[in-house]
Image (cartoon, grey):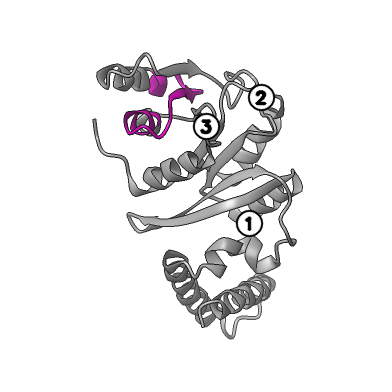
Amino acid sequence: MEEISERLLAAAQLAAAGFAPGGSRCLADIGTDHALLPIYMVRHGLADSALALDVRRGPLERARQHVQEAGLAGSITCRLSDGLEGVRRGEADVFVICGMGGHLIEKILSAGKDRLTERSRIVAGPQLDVPDFRAFAVREGWRIRCERMVRENGKFYTLMLLERGEEVEPLTDVELHYGRQLLTGRDPVLRDYLVREKKLTDRIREQLTGKESPGARLRLSQLSRQEALLDKAFLYYR
């Protein structure tokens, strides 16, 4: 069995933090693929049991094979499931939904509302539209309890642990884009991401300088908004 990636390790740590002390510890991994996360968590005592769910039969069969090879068929159940439909209400305590776009995670959570309880925790790892997903989470009554950012194979990934509740204060525009806890904690991986984004915006602005087409003016306007957000984010690192 291959080792899990740094991104999955961060998801495992957030999921473990989401279990209530003294309660049951059942994990539901949505879009489990090879079931690496459930196997890791059960094998290392971070979860008592797990549901490995996938909408595709091929990956689910691979997941079953890996679970059997790990000798954990008694603790990990593999199910064909579109989103949360394969989970009974209250059956799982922490739901992990990573490796897909933020808008798709929104759809999964919206469609599966009836499978969640007030005690449910969500570990979300949106790969696209992260600011939109943060706004969605807050709007739907979720509080961002913890947030992590990892860099893997040159790509940046944001993961967050959600629980029911309201933020103490509304998230600002820069916090929606980059994460309140990442910013206030001066997360070093986020800083690397900000530096990369600043270099990219500088390069694009240089390429557009002097161009007067409507498309160029629109892109420059968008760049100005992005640069303003980056400037606000860098203030946290001073």
Residue appearing at x 37%, y 44% in the figure: 9
> Percent x, y for residue 99?
47, 41
Residue topped by disc 1: 131
Res. 225 image quadrant: bottom right
Q: Which of the two residues, 172 or 101, is positioned nearer the viewer here?
A: 172
Q: Nearer the viewer, mark 3 or mark 2?
A: 3
The range drawn in magenta is 38-60
Q: Residues within 10 Å of mark 2 (few under 14, many from 20)?
A: some
132 versus 180 height, above or below: above
Q: Which of the two residues, 50 or 85, is positioned nearer the viewer here?
A: 50
Residue appearing at x 60%, y 39% in the figure: 105
Q: Nearer the viewer, mark 1 or mark 3?
A: 3
Residue topped by disc 3: 22
Q: Residues within 10 Å of mark 1 (few under 14, many from 20)?
A: some
Visible residue check, residue 17: yes
Left or right of residue 235, residue 67 in this image: left
Q: Are marks 1 and 2 in contact (CB under 8 Å)?
A: no
Q: Looking at the image, is mark 1 or mark 2 earlier in the sequence?
A: 2
C-alpha span from label 3 to label 2: 22 Å
58 versus 171 height, above or below: above
> Percent x, y for residue 32?
44, 29
* Amino acid type shown at disc 2: Arg
Visible residue check, residue 129: no
Left or right of residue 98, residue 111 in this image: right
Q: Secondary structure at mark 3?
A: loop
Residue topped by disc 2: 115
C-alpha span from label 1 to label 2: 25 Å
Residue appearing at x 54%, y 29% in the figure: 23
Left or right of residue 214, residue 178 in this image: left
Q: Secondary structure at mark 1?
A: helix
